[in-house]
């Protein structure tokens, strides 16, 4: 009450083993957490766990609001190979294999936002969950195309029949786009200009002489925006709220996310401006992947690509790829947070705050949490989202939030 910053926590039902997700055990953990710092919202998902969902959305709720954390275009029940985006070589999304063998049910494969059967299934499932449990809203995740962490092949999508038809209706021939990509983007076809979502000025510059590819970027963003707007309208018609999980601003346009548009649909927006996480959406993985993949695609040296990126992405210069891969520079985190605040003005911007710590994978200490909070406050954020799983968050990493 009366606190200046909104505090939200994610609770994953796919990153822990069954015994750790036993409802009483989770409840105890939550109670321990809110004794340290009260939470405004709990975002829980995405695999349905009846007893746990009933307990935490019902009389035993420990947060004022409970949102369903839902992967709209990935890993939903009924998620099928035929739903996946198709790349310019007519292959399906490969996903990211970093969790292979860990039992974590997160494939990072993406369904096409224009695929009607995929939409029918994912919406049907979301509708059922929101109707059955007393969630206050939905926190939409995976509202995008694949990212560079999956490799460039996954990024250069989608060329499925649904997309071809949709693109043709706005005057974009995806066969021509495909041909231009096959040539390594050297054809320079197309005419005029196409505005792409803001935040990725580097991408606009990179494709300045490729109006057709810029038009493709814009088409992809429209495809994501349309499906999110459709879902938001349906959810709001049920009297429930919408929040969105989005990429860091410099990378958002590349995965089809128009941050100002999405913010206009949402109660709060969480940009994933991660420093230590390793994998899709994490800057430490995405930026080096972007540089390496683009160098390969354009046939230039990695060093040259790094230099170019450093000149076009704020606070990236002066770092080697190895340094970025160890941890994204704090100054970059700050620059991305400031950009996010600028882009989503008018909606509550709650920065993703890494609190999870997994020995040997990503070791986040209370000092790291303090540093990220300081950078977020300096950037003008409205709150923080403890990411991405309370069950993997040591209690000492909650302590720094008491200062808010
Ligand atoms: Zn498609």
Image (cartoon, rainbow, N blue to C red):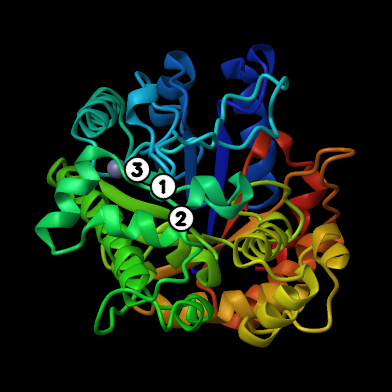
Q: Residue 138, which numbered label?
A: 3
Q: Residue at x 29, y 70 (%)?
A: 215
Give the CA separation, mark 3 to mark 2: 39 Å
Q: Secondary structure at mark 3?
A: strand
Q: Residue 182, which numbered label?
A: 2
Q: Which residue is mark 1?
A: 88
Residue 318 visible within the image: yes
Q: Could you say where residue 212 lies in the image, as x and y percent from the top left?
A: 31, 71
Q: Quick one: label 3, few (<14), some, or many (20+) residues within 10 Å?
A: many
- Marks 1 and 3: CB-CB under 8 Å? no
- 293 to 213, vertically: above or below: above
- 45 to 199, vertically: above or below: above
Query: In the rendered view, does 390 fall on the left or right side of 137?
Result: right
Q: Residue at x 42, y 43 (%)?
A: 87
Residue 266 visible within the image: no
Q: Secondary structure at mark 1?
A: loop
- Marks 1 and 2: CB-CB under 8 Å? yes
């Amino acid at each position: 009450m009366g606190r200046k910053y909104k505090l939200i926590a994610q609770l994953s039902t796919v990153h822990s083993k069954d015994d750790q997700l036993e409802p009483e055990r989770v409840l105890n953990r939550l109670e321990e957490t809110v004794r340290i710092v009260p939470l405004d919202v709990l975002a829980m998902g995405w695999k349905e766990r009846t007893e746990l969902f009933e307990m935490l959305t019902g009389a035993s709720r420990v947060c004022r609001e409970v949102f369903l954390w839902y992967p709209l275009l990935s890993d939903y029940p009924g998620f099928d190979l035929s739903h996946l985006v198709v790349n310019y070589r007519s292959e399906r999304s490969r996903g990211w294999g970093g969790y292979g063998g860990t039992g974590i049910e997160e494939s990072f494969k993406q369904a096409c936002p224009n695929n009607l059967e995929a939409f029918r299934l994912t919406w049907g499932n979301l509708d059922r969950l929101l109707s059955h449990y007393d969630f206050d809203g939905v926190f939409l995740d995976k509202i995008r195309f694949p990212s560079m962490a999956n490799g460039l092949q996954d990024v250069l999508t989608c060329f499925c029949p649904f997309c071809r038809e949709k693109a043709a209706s706005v005057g974009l021939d995806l066969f021509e786009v495909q041909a231009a990509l096959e040539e390594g983007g050297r054809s320079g076809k197309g005419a005029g200009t196409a505005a792409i979502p803001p935040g990725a000025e580097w991408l606009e510059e990179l494709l300045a002489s490729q109006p057709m590819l810029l038009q493709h970027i814009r088409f992809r963003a429209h495809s994501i925006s349309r499906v999110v707007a459709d879902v938001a309208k349906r959810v709001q018609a049920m009297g429930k709220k919408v929040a969105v999980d989005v990429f860091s601003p410099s990378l958002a346009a590349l995965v089809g996310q128009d941050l100002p548009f999405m913010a206009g649909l949402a109660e709060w927006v969480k940009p994933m401006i991660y420093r230590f996480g390793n994998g899709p959406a994490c800057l430490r993985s995405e930026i080096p992947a972007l540089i390496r993949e683009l160098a390969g695609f354009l046939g230039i040296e990695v060093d040259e690509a790094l230099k170019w990126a450093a000149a076009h992405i704020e606070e990236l210069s002066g770092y080697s790829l190895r340094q970025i891969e160890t941890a994204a520079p704090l100054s970059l985190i700050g620059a991305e947070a400031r950009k996010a605040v600028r882009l989503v003005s008018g909606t509550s911007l709650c920065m993703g705050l890494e609190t999870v710590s997994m020995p040997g994978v990503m070791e986040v200490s209370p000092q790291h949490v303090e540093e990220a909070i300081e950078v977020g406050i300096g950037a003008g954020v409205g709150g923080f989202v403890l990411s991405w799983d309370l069950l993997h968050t040591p209690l000492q990493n909650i302590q720094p939030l008491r200062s808010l």
